Amino acid sequence: MVSAKRPPVLASQRVIDAAEIAVAPRRRSADDLLRLVPGVLLSQHGAEGKGQQLFLRGFDAAHGTDVEVTVAGIPVNELSNIHGQGYLDLNFMIPEVVRSISVSKGPFQINQGNFANAGTLRFELGVDPAARGTRVGYELGSTIRHRGVVVHAPKRLGPRTFTAFEAMRDEGFAPGRRAQRVSSMSQVRLIDSPVYGSLDLLGSGYYARFGSPGALAAADVASGRVPFDGVYQDDGGGTSIRSLASLRHQIGLGVGKLEQRLYGQFRHFDMLENFTGYLQDPVHGDRRSQMHRVFSAGYQIEYQRPLVETLVLTVGGSWQGDSISQEDRRVDARHGVVHNNWMLGVGQHQASARAGLRWRPTKWLHLEGGARADLFAYDVIDYLQDDVREQKVVGRASPRLLAAFRLGPRMSLFAAYGRGLRAPEARSILAGVTAPSDVVLDRYKGGTPRVVPSDAIELGARFTGTRYLSAGLAAFATWIDRELVFDHVSAVNLELNQTRRLGVEIDVALRPVPWLLLRQDLTLTQARFVGSGAPVPGAPPLLSGSSLTLIHPSGIRAGARLQVVGARPLPHGASSATYALLDLSVGYRHGPLQLDLQIDNATNARWKEGEYHFASWWNRADPRSTLPSLHLSAGPPLAVRLATTLYFM
C-alpha cells in the first residue's frame, strides 16, 4: 500500500491528499477526482453515472481496461462487464469522504493486479481531523443542478469513521445529459484492541440513472443538420446500482503485521445506446440494450514481517468469485426486442498469490523484488445456443523489481521493471465452440481466451528540495502482447497485435508560501504497433496540466487547473482536435459557514470531449455507406455551481 509517510519507491509515484481534493476544480463526482492525477485524461460521452473513458501512459483504457482502481482496498474494475472489460464506475463514492488518492504508474509492485498495465489508483476513505464533525451542504448549478450532502464524522473517533449521504439531480447542459443519483457510505471501527487488533466495517449503497447522447457525425454538425450539442435519439441512457460491504482486520503478530479483508458486492448495470444509426438494421435501427448483473464475494490477506532489521518479507493472496448474468439485444424505437445478440450466464473466479522482499542494505539504497501468480477460472453458459457450456482456467506469473538510490538528502534515482496482465473476457471463452456462422461469431469478437501480458520499465529521478520546490522526471516504456480496441460498429472489443509505448513524464511543484501550491505536469507518449509502426488509436501523445491550490489561514481557498490535450490518432488514419480547458474554484469559510463557487470551462471554449472514427448511417434519405467518418461528443460549455456548507462541531 502506498503511504504518504513512506518515501517514494518510484519516480512517478504520487499521493494526492485531502487538502488538494477539497479545493479541486470540476469536482462534480468522485470520477472527476481522477483529473487530479498527472497524466490522466478523462472523456465522458454520456452523463454522470456512466463510467468515463480513461487515458493513461499512452493507453486508451476505455472504461478501465488497463488501469486498476481500488476503493478502500476493494478492487472495483469489473471483469467481463458487458459494456467494457474492466469497467469502472466510481460515482458511488462521495467526494467529501475521499481522504487520499495514491498513484502508482506501471505494473511495478507485487500488490498491483489485473488491469494494472498503465498503473494503479487507490482511493482511501475517511475524513481528516481538520474537517471532522457534522456538515450539511447544498449545491446549485447553472445546468439546473441540485446536490445535497450530509457527512457525520465525530471528532472523538479516528479519521476512518464517518457516515455520509448524497443526493443529486442535474438536467445537463444539453439533451441526453440528464443524471440523478443517491449514494450512502458509512465506515466505522468496530474493534480497536491491543490484543485483537482493529476491525473496520464499510458499507455503501448507490442508485443512479443517466442519459447517453451518443456521438454525432461531424459532417452532420458542419452542415447544420444537428446542433453541436444535439442528439439523434433522445432515449439513450441507463441505470447503475451498487451495494457493497467489507470487513477489514489488522493485527500485530509479534514483529509482523497481518491484514485481512472480506467483502461482498452486488452490481446492476443496464444501458441503451445507438452509435451507428441504421447501418446494421435499416428498418428498426441499431439501438443496443445491455443488461449486466453480478454478485461478488472476495477475500484478501497480507502478512509483513522483518526477517532482519534491513529485510522485510511480504506475502499475500486474494480471491474473488463472481456470479454474472448478462444480455445484449438489438431493440426497436419502442425498445421491443428485434434480435438477441447474446445471453450468457457466467461464473468466474480470480485468485492470486504473491511474495516479495524489501531490502535496505544502506540508508541510500532501497530494493524491492518479488513475483505474483494470478489464476482465472471461467464457467460460461450460452443460453442462445442450446445452453452450450465451456469451462477454462488460465493464469500468468508476473515478476516485479524496483530500486531507489538516494544521491543525497534531496535527490533520488529510481529504476523499475514489472510484468502486468489483463485477464480475458468471459464471452471470449465461447469463441471456439459457437456455431460457425458469421452472425454468431461476430458476437464473440473479444480476443483469445488467455491472459495478455505486458512488460514495462521505468527510469527516473526526483528532487525534493526545501519545502518550496520538488520535481520529478520519469522515462517509461511498455510492451503489451495484444492490444484491445473498442469497435463502435460491432460494440465489442477487438484484439489486435502487439504494441509498445515510449514516454516521458515531468512534474514540478512549487510552494512559494505555505498556503500556495503550484504544479505543472507534462506527459509525452508515443504509442505504436510493433509490426506496422502505425499509431495506436486513441492514445494522446501530449497531456499538460497546470494547477494552483490556495488554502489561506484567513479561510479563503481557491483552485485552478488548465489542461492541454494534443491531437489523438484515431482509427483508419484520422486524428482528433487539440483543446485546452480551464476550470476554477474559489471558496471562503468563516466559522461554521463555508461558500464555494466552481466554474467549469471558464473560457466557454467550444470543444469536443470525445472524438471517434467509425461508420454510421443516420439519414436514410442519403446513400448508405460503410466508410468510417469522424464523430464527436460535445464537451460541456461554461457551467457555474454555487455550494454552501454548514458545519456543526
Image: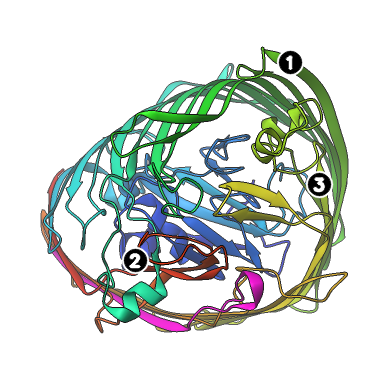
Seen from the viewer's position, the closer of residues 86 and 522 is 86
Q: Residue at x 72, y 42 (%)?
A: 113
Is 41 left or right of 497, judged from the image as shown?
Answer: left
Whether residue 372 is situated above or below residue 216 in the rendered picture: above
Expressed as whole percent of the image width and height from the top left, the position of residue 531 reads: 88, 70
Kind of residue indicated by mark 1: Arg
Give the residues in magenta: 568-589
Which is nearer the N-term, disc 2 or disc 1? 2
Whether residue 300 is situated above or below residue 492 in the rendered picture: above
Q: In front of the other: label 2 or label 1? A: 1
Point out the residue furthest to the bottom here.
512
Residue placed under numbered mark 3 in the picture: 452
Which is nearer the N-term, disc 3 or disc 1? 1
Residue 389's tag is 1
Which is nearer the N-term, disc 2 or disc 3? 2
Is residue 324 within the magenta segment? no
